[in-house]
Image (spheres, grey):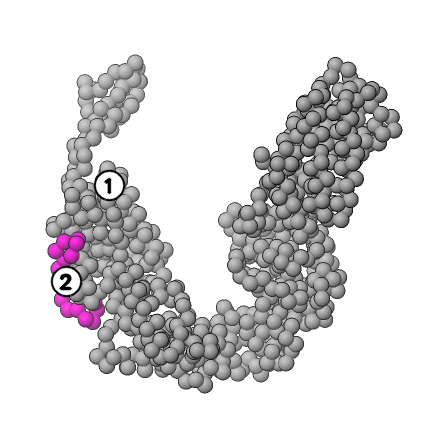
Amino acid sequence: MANFLLELRCEEIPARMQAKASEDLARLFRDKLAESGLRPGEIMSYVTPRRLALIAHDLPMATDAVSEEYKGPRTSAPPQALEGFLRKTGLTQDQLEDRDGIWFALVEKPGRATADVLAEAIPAIVRAFPWPKSMRWGDASLSSGSLRWVRPLQGIVALLGHDVVPFAIEGVAAGNATVGHRFHSRGPVTITSPEAYVTALEQAHVIVDQEQRKAIIRGEANRLAREAGLELIPDEGLVAENAGLTEWPVPLLGRFDPAFLEVPPEVIQLTLRINQKYFVLRDGAGKLANAFICTANIVASDGGAAIVAGNGKVLAARLSDARFFWEQDRKTPLAVQAQKLGRITFHEKLGTVADKVERVANLAEWLASEGIVPDCDPALARQAAELCKADLVTEMVGEFPELQGLMGGYYARAEGLPDAVADAIRDHYKPVGQGDDVPTDPVTVAVSLADKLDTIIGFFAIDERPTGSKDPFALRRAALGCIAIMSTAGLRLGLQDALGWWRHSANQTLPNETYDNLLDFFADRLKVQQREAGVRHDLIDAVFALGGEDDLVRLLARVKALQAFVGTPDGANLLAGYKRAANILKKERPEGIKPESEAGEEDPGVALTDPDVAEAIRVHDENVGPGYEPEPAEAALMAALDAAEPRADAAIEAEDFEGAMAALATLRAPIDAFFDAVTVNDPDERKRNSRLNLLTRIRAAVHKVADFSRIES
């Protein structure tokens, strides 16, 4: 057994690619060796800005000898088939075995030295490496067959134990020498063994373990913040990025002119974080501090003073730009800015952003005026909607697109617009994902919901629906946002109504299938969202299957009541009784009950689920009677149905779905007794038809709440 070290050294690897590259190298190495029967022990993978490395522990020095059997052609096959099989196996005909008229070959493969396997595997891994972006370089780049790598490959270390594994890639030969830190190390660094790699490079001022570099950055940045009486705003993404930019990280604390703090804090944070990769700090009161922490890649002789000064100058220039944008944007009212939206195309089939804003304003005002969003002033909703996209044309959002909405809120407040309008402009994009805040202020709810509904309906109207994994307009996220807003605020809005209003507002006709497509789309999104809350998808299907239900709040209330009910013994037993009745009805169609209007149905059982049919049966039995003396259990079930059906109807009408379930639960015992004591398929046709009618009533009564046939046992 021996350990194996591989280091692939090159020019700067972008920080965003490093983590996946490190994982890919370990995965590809393990998979490639497995093809030769080699199973390494633990694999440690490392990455720095200039090198990708791994150490594989406990590799055997040779692969095992193996015997492989190949099945060949029939002995009666043409000679050419046999010749091809012999070429493939490298054997002669007398070495083959005839088994029932088929040639078989047993090929003995001797073990191979692990070094030889590695010498073949590593170049193959390097050539097939899945960099998201790669390049060719030098004279070889003229050939399309030359090596592609993230940056020019400069050196390879390949050591199996103490020995170099001999191979070369594009003229770069494997060896045992690498280089240390760009500034703190001179000359080659000789690696004597895989076990010595990490220590040897640390002595050359390179920390190859990315987790160790992260820990240093995290710990030192917090220490500097504490010593300055400040608090570091945690940012693990920035920790990882700084670790990917440095081989010997040295955090340093700097200051900037406090006058810049007049700019909104989000702008300063973005400037520090996105443009400069600096950590942000806050003071004891929780306000943004005029301080930053940058991460140097060297130990400076002056303690980092020059580095901090240089970074401070660059930061000052950035913040000056931000302050200029802030001052300039406030000179133009949002209403004037909004006039520029007519120059921006939202979608070639849906018009400009100004067109979208007009639709959103109409929809938001309608949501408020109809009371769909309670306690919402229609005029404020319209005003907020008309201005909600105005900041897209400001200088600040042009520089920092991440601040759209947020800057609009600041500018609206600076103009003296009502707080409700400013808040709605700021928050109307929310929620943008799982876990994001869901708006609750009425004006914000109206604008946010209108914006998302307009986007979804608009793209469905032009048949630009999400397909498979493709969702270029983020409609799935918008639908989840709609569901979150409506369920949180308890908004009673049917999709049919929203669709109708959008059609009126956009002055467009829509294909007939748009509503069905929208309903299916929201049903799928609802199942995704409710799965997180532990709601069963089959119960959502069972309620959607009733048809005509597009009020998501009412639908969710029905689903949750159903989930609670089927989890009880009464619910489970009723479900079992329902399935037994439904199975019998599938086989035995009651004659003479099917309405004339149902004639010609492909599935005769469809009519049996119709509550109108069940009601006709009930009226018939009430007026005419079954024509015989029912058995006690049969009569008890009839009485239970007579009592339960009106109660369930009244509860459903009042949207008291728990009450409807409770009414149905009273059927459990009579149904059990009926199946225990009564024979449905009685030889007497009158009895048989009457009992099948009774089962039809059970089925129809249950279907008033949900399609129980969609519920999984």
Q: Residue at x 62, y 64 (%)?
A: 440
Of all residues, the one furthest to the right in this rendering is: 623
Query: Which quarter of the picture shows residue 631?
Result: top right
> Which range is magenta?
180-196
Q: Secondary structure at mark 2?
A: strand
As for residue 182 lying within the magenta part, the answer is yes
User: Residue 189 got which mark?
Assistant: 2
Horizontal and vertical percent for residue 346? 59, 63
Label 1 is placed on what type of residue? Arg
Tell me whether circle 1 and circle 2 mark residues in contact (CB < 8 Å): no
Badge 1 density bin: few <14, some 14–19, many ≥20, Cα 10 Å: some
Would residue 137 be visible to someone looking at this image?
Answer: no
As for residue 195 lying within the magenta part, the answer is yes
Horizontal and vertical percent for residue 71? 29, 23
The N terminus is located in which quarter? top left
- Closest to the camera, between mark 1 and mark 2, is 1
Horizontal and vertical percent for residue 412? 61, 77
Q: Which circle's residue, 1 or 2, is located before the other in the chain?
A: 1
Q: Secondary structure at mark 1?
A: loop
What is the chief secondary structure element of the magenta stretch?
Answer: loop
User: Residue 39 got which mark?
Assistant: 1
